[in-house]
Amino acid sequence: MKTLLIGFLLLFIAMILLGIGVFFSKKKEFPSGHIGDSEAMKERNIGCATSQDAEMRAKKNPLEELLKSDEYNYLH
């Protein structure tokens, strides 16, 4: 029980310190934790997995296009 109380106290102190950092910063917001918002990752052309997945889903798959085409249906 004592360990749990100490853990909650440390967590509370950490949250208070983060809040103070936000309160006194010029941006007034927490720093973004997303990979795509990091300048170092942008330089390496690395984005977040969600964005990359959406980009890949937006691309047309040539095999699917062939299977949907009239020429393929004519042959089979």
Image (cartoon, rainbow, N blue to C red):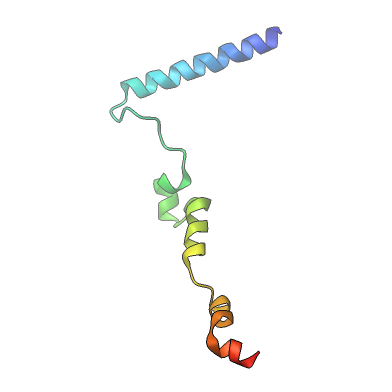
Q: Residue furthest toward the top?
A: 2
Is 61 displayed left or right of 43 in the figure?
right
Q: Residue at x 56, y 82 (%)?
A: 66
Q: Residue at x 47, y 64 (%)?
A: 58
Residue 68 placed where, x, y %? 55, 80
* In this view, 28 is above or below 74: above
* In this view, 53 is above or below 6: below
Where is the C terminus found, in terms of image quarters? bottom right
Is 10 displayed left or right of 58 in the figure?
right
Is 66 displayed left or right of 41 in the figure?
right
Quarter-wise, where is residue 23 in the image?
top left
Q: Residue furthest toward the left?
A: 26
Where is the N terminus found, in terms of image quarters? top right
- The front one of 50 and 34 is 50
Q: Residue at x 51, y 51 (%)?
A: 50
The total number of labels drawn is 0
Residue 17 placed where, x, y %? 44, 18
Residue 19 placed where, x, y %? 41, 20
* In this view, 13 is above or below 72: above
Is 9 displayed left or right of 30 in the figure?
right
Q: Residue furthest toward the right?
A: 1
Residue 43 placed where, x, y %? 40, 54
Q: Residue at x 45, y 56 (%)?
A: 44
* In this view, 27 is above or below 3: below
